Amino acid sequence: MSQIQIAERYAKSLIELAQEQNKLAQVSEDVLSLEAVCNHKEFAAMLQSPVINSDKKSAIFKQLFTDNMDTLSYQFIQLLLLKGRESLLPSICSAFIRQYRTIRKIRIARVLSATVLNEAELVNIKNRFSAWLKPGETMELHQKLEPTLIGGFIFEMGDQNCDASIKRQLEEMKESLYDKSYISLVEKR
C-alpha cells in the first residue's frame, strides 16, 4: 500500500472518530495548526529522522501540543508515534483537510493581486463570484501577491478563472495596436 493511501485512511479514520464525538470543527482547527507546524523545515526533519527515537518525539509533541489541542487530536498523534507513522503526519494533515473541505462543501478560491487587498475588497470579490458556487457550497478565499499584474486581480476557483488585471488589458491593447486586419478592410473600400 502506498504512503498516500495510508495517509488517506488515517485521515478518514480521524474524521469519522471526530464526527462520532461531535468534535470535527475543533479537530480540523488542530489539524490546520499541526499542518502549519509540519511546514517548518526543522520540524519536518525531526519527523523524518530515524536518529530521534519515538520517546524523544513524543516528548516534543507533548511540550508543543498538550495544552493547545483537543484530547482526540493529541491521542491521534500519540497513536501515530506508537505505530511509527509520524513521518506521514504532513500527508495525513493534507488528506484530512481535503476530506474535511469535501464534507463541508468548501471550495478553495484564489485571488492574485499586485497589492494586498483589504477586507472590504475581498468581500466584494467573494460576493461577485459567489454565483460560481453550487447550492450549499461555501468559498474559502486565499490571497496571493503577484506584483507583475500591475493592478487589478485574477480570480481562480477550480478550473474557472477571471482575469481582471491591468497586465492583461495592456497586452490586449498592444495586440490590437499591431493588428493589421483593419488595413485590408479600409483598402477594400
Image: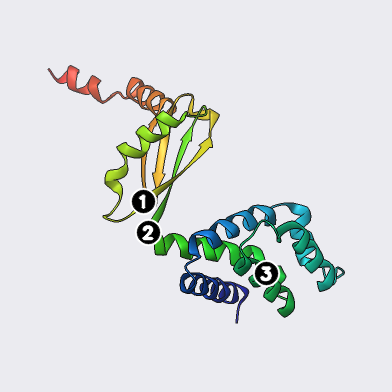
The residue under the point 29% across, 56% down is 136
Going from N to C along the chain, the mark reached first, 1 or 2, is 2
Where does label 2 land, which residue? 105
Label 3 secondary element:
helix
The residue under the point 49% across, 64% down is 24
Check whether the beta carbons of the residues at disc 1 and disc 2 lie within 8 A of each other: yes
Q: Estimate the x, y position of residue 76 in percent, counting from the top left.
A: 64, 72
Name the foreground residue: 171 vs 164: 164
Q: Amino acid at mark 1?
A: Thr
- Could you tell me how far apart the alpha carbons at marks 1 and 2 are, in whole angstroms? 6 Å
> On screen, 95 above or below 119?
below
Check whether the beta carbons of the residues at disc 3 and disc 2 lie within 8 A of each other: no
The residue under the point 66% across, 56% down is 68
The residue under the point 40% across, 23% down is 170
> On screen, 10 above or below 139?
below
- Depth check, mark 3 against mark 2: the one in front is 3
Where does label 3 land, which residue? 77
Crowding around mark 2 (Cα neighbors within 10 Å: few <14, some 14 to 19, many 20+) is some
Q: Is residue 117 left or right of residue 178?
A: right
Res. 135 image quadrant: bottom left
Tell me the quadrant of the picture where the C terminus can be found.
top left
Going from N to C along the chain, the mark reached first, 3 or 2, is 3
Crowding around mark 1 (Cα neighbors within 10 Å: few <14, some 14 to 19, many 20+) is some
Label 2 secondary element:
loop
> On screen, 108 above or below 112?
below
Residue 138 numbered mark, or none: 1
Res. 87 image quadrant: bottom right
Going from N to C along the chain, the mark reached first, 3 or 1, is 3
Tell me the quadrant of the picture where the N terminus can be found.
bottom right
